[in-house]
Image (cartoon, rainbow, N blue to C red):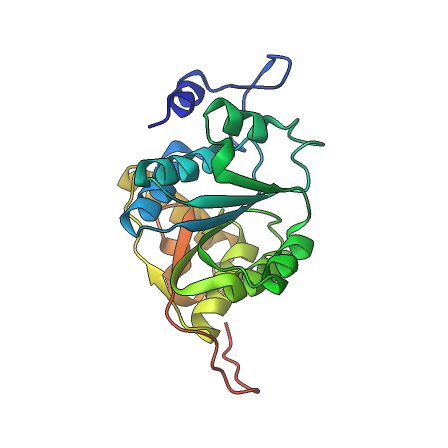
Amino acid sequence: MNQLLEEIYSTKSVKDAQGNSINPFPTATPYDIGTILNELIQKNNLERTLEIGMAYGLSTLFICQAHHDKGRGIHTAIDPMQNSVWKSIGLLNVERAGFADKVRFLEACSDEALPQLVAKGEKLDFAFIDGSHHFDYTLVDFFYVDKLLEVGGYVIFDDIWMPGIRKVVSYILRNRDYELTKVDTKGSIWEGLMKSTKRFLQNPFEREYGGIKFIFNNICILKKISEDTRHWDYHRSF
């Protein structure tokens, strides 16, 4: 793994442009989640990747490390607050790790940047959605990501401990041709059970398709099986 990543996780700190240390956790991507991103990209030889929500850039580094190890690939990161909130630390970490040539950064809201990529006819093999966690914004992110994503590509939703995120995933599994991909559990079974129990208690009487509440990890991986061929009035409750 990249030396900078190892340093960040061992010291639990990132540095801004002035050299000040900041604890990026719990905001930043956990090591086990980053490893899953990295392994998925390498295993499936995914070359055109995108993430919504860069923050301190840890997920970016895991993704770029995968491209580096494969010998090819380009990554797009979208974050409207990289400079204002995150002090450009994500971009600094990309440079420090030697991955600047692998990243295209778009400092814009995802609902503005994604339609522009669609209009340009761009395509993706992988997307990591970790931006606004409201149901409507997450659904809009998926709407445009789906237009960009090739059949056989993957979209990952972070923070499925939040009911709004799970509701989006439930909608997709009920109404679109995507399948839930098994995630190898990196933590202990006890930790996974605790996560699942907390999700269940959030809304115990609300049905969520696909058993999303009981996924042990905090991410959900979906694989695109086919393009959208729904009839104009198709709808399934979710």
* Residue drawn at x 64%, y 61% as measured from the top left: 115
Count of numbered badges drawn on the protein: 0
Q: Quarter-wise, where is residue 141 in the image?
A: bottom right
Q: Is residue 160 visible?
A: no
Q: Is residue 66 left or right of residue 84?
A: left
| Image quadrant occupied by the N terminus | top left
* Residue drawn at x 46%, y 45% as measured from the top left: 74
Q: Residue furthest top?
A: 19
Query: Residue 230 location in percent, x, y?
Result: 49, 82
Q: Is residue 54 left or right of residue 208?
A: right
Name the one closer to the observer, 153 or 190. 153
Q: Residue furthest right?
A: 84
Name the one closer to the observer, 52 or 195. 52
Query: Residue 208 location in percent, x, y?
Result: 45, 65
Query: Residue 44 location in percent, x, y?
Result: 30, 52
Q: Is residue 168 visible?
A: yes
Query: Residue 197 location in percent, x, y?
Result: 40, 49
> Does residue 150 lie above or below 77 as drawn?
below
* Residue drawn at x 37%, y 54% as measured from the top left: 214
> Does residue 42 lie above or below 139 as drawn?
above
